[in-house]
Amino acid sequence: MSTKIMLSRGSLLIISAQAVCTPPSPLATRATIDSNHNF
């Protein structure tokens, strides 16, 4: 369980880093929202 949460947080950090490095796109925004709902 905790491992799954750690992986989810890791992927969220990656998504956030990509969002900072690239212009915002609807797809990236939706992926971030979906990741947040998974918690």
Image (cartoon, grey):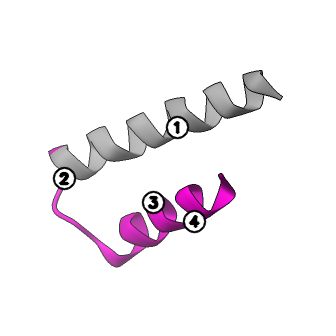
Note whether 12 is above or below 24 in the view shown: above
Which residue sits at x=26%, y=52%? Answer: 19
- Distance CA(mark 3)–CA(mark 2): 14 Å
Magenta span of residues: 21-39
Residue 34 tag number: 4
The amino acid beneath tag 3 is: Thr
Q: Between disc 1 and disc 2, whose residue precedes?
A: 1
Q: Write down the residue under mark 2.
A: 22
Label 2: how many residues lie within 10 Å, few (<14), some (14-19) or many (20+)?
few
Q: Measure how far apart labels 2 and 4 are at the Cα level.
A: 19 Å
Secondary structure beneath dot 2 equals loop
Please say whether residue 22 is one of the residues in the magenta stretch.
yes
Q: Of the residues under marks 2 and 4, which one precedes in the sequence?
A: 2
Whole-number angstrom distance, CA of label 1 to CA of label 3: 10 Å
Q: Which is more toward the observer, 25 or 16?
A: 16
Q: Position of residue 33 (x, y in %)?
A: 48, 66
Amino acid on which disc 4 is placed: Asp
Question: Percent position (x, y) of residue 13?
Answer: 40, 35
Residue 11, which numbered label? 1
Q: Position of residue 36 (x, y in %)?
A: 54, 57
**Residue behind mark 3:** 32
Nearer-N-terminus badge (1/4):
1
- Marks 4 & 3, CB-CB < 8 Å contact: yes
Task: State how far apart marks 4 and 3 are (Cα).
Answer: 5 Å
> Is disc 4 placed on a helix, strand or loop?
helix
